[in-house]
Amino acid sequence: MLVNFNSLPGTARIWIYQCNRSFTDAEVEEITQSLTLFLKNWTAHGSDLQAGFEIKYKRFIVIALDQQINAATGCSIDASVKFIQDLESIYKVDLMDKMNVSYKQGDYVAYKSLIDFKKMAKDKAVSKNTIVFNNLVNSKAEYLEFWEVPASESWHSRFV
């Protein structure tokens, strides 16, 4: 069951999928429609899952699930992964690779491989104050508080 992302509690489980490029406005609209349909019908063993989403910076798909109502199961998580993989295929993008880093350069969101990010840190092209996206957050509360942070406050700190 689709619910408004903002209405979900801080304990809601979060999945963040970062794209290797920005989506176009038309793609954001199409993905919004696809996510809406998917989450309206997302279930775990026949029970509705209360979930919401947002698309941030035309680059991140963020799905939140209120597990206090009904928890995701292996099958429901598999269904969501398949949905994301279908988006990858349709839009010719990478959404599942966790070995890449997104960070801010002014108002622009940059995307680099972890190897390139490490090299940039070594070359002082990024610093402990560079705003990074910590896609390892697990809950909506963590997402709101610790997702978009200086590198010094994230797992990225080991490189800067």
Image (spheres, grey):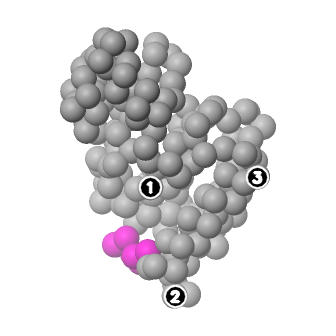
Give x and y (percent) for residue 91: 74, 46
Give x and y (percent) for residue 103: 42, 26
Q: CB atoms at circles 3 and 2 under 8 Å apart?
A: no
Residue beneath the point at 33% across and 12% down: 123
Q: Is residue 92 left or right of residue 128?
A: right
Identify residue type, mark 3: Ile
Segment tinted magenta in the rendering: 67-72
Question: Magenta includes 68?
Answer: yes
Give x and y (percent) for residue 11: 30, 59
Q: Between 154 and 146, which is closer to the camera in this rendering?
A: 154
Residue beneath the point at 28% across and 33% down: 156
Circle 3 packing at 10 Å, graded few (<14), some (14-19), many (20+), is few
Q: CA distance from mark 3 to mark 1?
A: 20 Å
The residue tagged 2 is 45
User: Which quarter of the rendering shows the N terminus?
Assistant: bottom right
Relative to residue 153, is residue 14 depicted above or below?
A: below
Mark toward the viewer: 3 or 2: 3
Identify residue type, mark 2: His
The residue tagged 1 is 15
Which badge, 3 or 1, is on the more N-terminal residue?
Answer: 1
Mark seen at residue 90: 3
